[in-house]
Image (tube, rainbow, N blue to C red):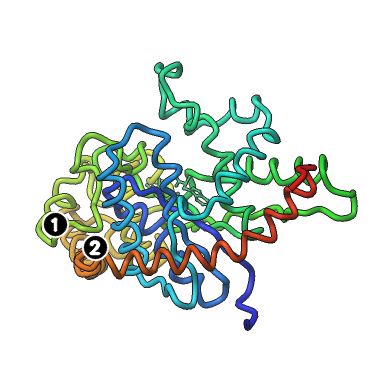
Amino acid sequence: MADKGPRIFSGIQPTGGLHLGNYLGALRNFVELQATHECIYCVVDLHAITAPHDPSELRQNTYEAVAAFLAAGVDARAHIIFNQARVAAHSELAWVFNCVARYGWLDRMTQFKEKVGKHRAKASVGLWVYPNLMAADILAYKAQKVPVGDDQRQHLELVRDIAQKFNHDFCPKDEPFFPLPEPLILKSGGRVMSLRDGTRKMSKSEPSSMSRILLTDDADAIAQKIRKAKTDALPCPAERDELPQRPEAANLIGIFAALANKPQETVLADYGGKPFSAFKADLAALTISTITPIGAEMARLLGDVTHLEQIMSDGAARAQAIARPIMKKVKELVGFAV
Ligand code: AMP
Ligand code: TRP
């Protein structure tokens, strides 16, 4: 096989309701990286069961996520798309990493703390060790780079700590086994915030559906959500240094810049001092022209589940072929008599 460049791994959870944050922070980047990397993109269904779920919804959401990869422009022939549960290496290596990662490391994970709040005792143990599974996802393929949104930065640091400790504990000094994977986080679009509160990230779990734009929203829904997006009483900002005190305005400017592939300065110069209504009309048009073709293609693909299943099983077979020799060596290094 021709050298396709450094190997990339990334994952998206099939929890339903993929949104503009997933697109700008992750999917769009996944598509671009295909030209210069060997890409493995995974629908992480094992991660999705760390929270209570409905089995039939999980399956449907898995198809939806595969459809989103394809509709955004991932090439399933040149690269790999599959769902995590089809490749046992993820669970096997995650167990080894449960025994490599230290309790204190996981205790620092802010995403876990944010997710469980005061109800820590009721959280699944899987949610607690979720970052170890993420480490297994990446390292089962010795992936070198991991495109993610900014919210995953801390998890990626933990993955590096796990790789380093495994190498230290089980490998000769001059022969480390795992690479230390690097996050690829976009400056523009890496952190899209809620349309209702510019200090919280846009997320599937926020109760108000007006807080996020879904990839499956139609033009009217997108226009309405942007028209109603929270702003402040002032006109559009003109200078970058106004943005920290104006989180909602900053978020909308950031989304515009990311979608238009322009620096924020250009957007500030174009709209500074103008009323938000004019800016929002242009932002809605830009969002609609980017998102609705993806939504339409997702709907078309979801009409042929057999085709999606075929893509997943083919992708899983190729993923497995990469992971197999790596897992064999892990077992040898750890000392399993297999
Ligand atoms: P998830 O659906 O939580 O598995 O996230 C899938 C990908 O989307 C990850 O790379 C996240 O970092 C990214 N992502 C999720 N929410 C946002 C957001 N609000 N802004 C930017 N990226 C995000
Ligand atoms: N934890 C990531 C998220 O919630 C999803 C994920 C799971 C992932 N495994 C991964 C991302 C491996 C990158 C690499 O967004």
Where disc 2 sits, the SS reads helix
Where disc 1 sits, the SS reads helix
Left or right of 150? Residue 180 is right
- Dot 1, how many residues are within 10 Å of its Cα: few (below 14), some (14-19), or many (20+)? many
Q: Is residue 258 above or below residue 231?
A: below
Q: Residue at x 59, y 53 (%)?
A: 138
Between residue 114 and residue 296, name the one nearer to us: 296
Q: Which residue is mark 2?
A: 287
- Dot 2, how many residues are within 10 Å of its Cα: few (below 14), some (14-19), or many (20+)? many
Ligand 1 contact, mark 1 (Cβ < 8 Å): no
Q: Is residue 158 above or below residue 86?
A: above
How many numbered discs, if any? 2
Q: Which residue is mark 1?
A: 223
Q: Residue at x 26, y 52 (%)?
A: 60
Q: Residue at x 44, y 65 (%)?
A: 81
Q: Residue at x 40, y 38 (%)?
A: 49
Between residue 129 and residue 259, name the one nearer to us: 129
In this view, which residue lies farthest toward the front?
338
Rendering coords of residue 281 (x, y %): 16, 60
Which amino acid, by three-letter code, is at mark 1? Ala
Rendering coords of residue 238 (x, y %): 33, 55
Rendering coords of residue 278 (x, y %): 16, 59
Between residue 180 and residue 248, name the one nearer to us: 180
Rendering coords of residue 6 (x, y %): 64, 69
